Image (cartoon, grey):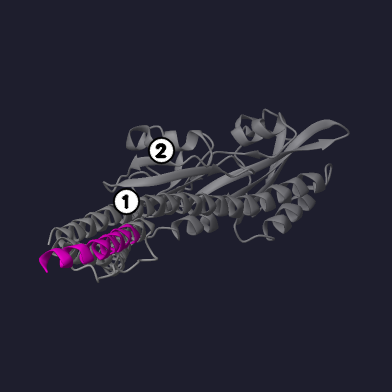
Amino acid sequence: MQLQKLSSNVNRGANRSVRNIITGLCALAGLIALGLILFYTVQNNSERVQLYSSQIDSKMSQKIAFIDAVALGVPVGASEDEYYTYVDMMAGLYDDVSAVYVCVEQDDVVYKDGIMTYMSGGWLPEDDFIVTDRAWYSGASGIDDVFVTEPYVDEQTGNICITLSKAIVRDGDVVGVAGLDMYMDDLVTLIEGSYDGGNYVFLTTEEGTILTHPDEELALSVEKSMTVAEALGGKYEKVCQKPLSTKLIWDYTGGLKFAVSNPAAATGWNVVAVITLSGVFAVFVITVILAVVLCLVLGRVVRHQLTNRIGPMFAPLEELAANVGRISEGQLDYSFPVDEQSREINALSVALNDTMEGLRHYRGQDQPACVKRFD
């Protein structure tokens, strides 16, 4: 009876230990799964923002190469008609280019700076127009590269526009500037197409002005502009400080989200991708449920295996305990079975059998003397 109780206690203890081990392993698996989910979520978000950056770079690199070619092909010293023909031809090459203009030095102009501006569509500036005061002109005339202005909103169309300009250089001297006005409709449509519930991508300038955003209060408009330093108490600014560094932010929608940014090489504009954590938690909950189910199934299987193994292990001991009393009763014709699976029980059985054999031998020697005395 005591051995049966011991067997039951050992069985319960073994089951408890195995259950604790399985629970720990399942918990560890859950934590590893969460880590992997977070890693791949961050990785996918980083790849997403890099994809948008590369698309913007591709678009803008095309226009940068275009204005470079426009400046190189300006027929300096041409007639007025030739200039207008040139800018009209160039403006017609791209649908998103709203205007192309060439500004060159001329001696017979009425403008104080001595620069004549030829713009596609035949636009003629007023007599007091001073083109050299324009940021796109002064910016391009002082550098060798293409100058890109900060985006602005066209008051007539409401579209976001930018100006690209390049110095016209002949024989090492700057003789004017070529420029183009470009609508950003395609880029805005590209970015706005990312709005997916709590997930979205938005675009900022190199100076931090927010161009596109699902929240109209933050997006650039004719009436206002917002910078990343001003929006959400500067949370976006921290995201933009280090490329491809994921930050956890409290979003304008009122929830925790992952945010990562990456600058477009051609313009320095920042693409910021924001992704909700709800998908991460959903996958984690499913993983935890699967881990719990697996833990229960494994626990049941292990308990069944332990019961089938521990029970037979105590069976030889129970048989030894049940028959060891034969010795005190003088029943020496019994032989204890030898269990080859356990060295300890085997040794005990052999010792008991040797004891029985010794007692039988001893009783065999004493038996004749006793018989003679009773006779």
Nearer to us in this view, 48 or 89: 48
Is 359 magenta? The answer is yes
Element type where label 2 sits in the image: helix
Nearer to us in this view, 97 or 254: 254
Identify the image quadrant of the N terminus: bottom left
Question: Which one is earlier in the sequence, the residue at label 2 or at label 1?
Answer: 1
Residue 325, located in which quarter of the rendered image? Answer: bottom left
Is 351 magenta? The answer is yes
Residue 153 at x, y = what percent? 47, 46
Q: What residue would you read off at disc 1?
A: 24
Report the disc number at residue 109.
none
Q: What residue would you read off at disc 2?
A: 236
Question: Image check: 261 left or right of 223?
Answer: right
Residue 242 at x, y = what percent? 51, 35
Identify the image quadrant of the C terminus: bottom left
Question: Do the residues bearing badges 2 and 1 touch, measured as CB atoms within 8 Å?
Answer: no
The amino acid at mark 2 is Tyr
Residue, x 24% and y 71% (percent of image)? 333
**Residue found farthest to the right:** 171
Question: Image check: 17 left or right of 77?
Answer: left
Provide the major secondary structure of the magenta segment. Answer: helix
Element type where label 1 sits in the image: helix
Residue 351, located in which quarter of the rendered image? Answer: bottom left
Residue, x 18% and y 57% (percent of image)? 6
Q: Is residue 134 above or below residue 69?
A: above
Q: Is residue 130 above or below residue 29?
A: above
Identify the magenta region: 350-375
Nearer to us in this view, 18 or 169: 18
The amino acid at mark 1 is Gly
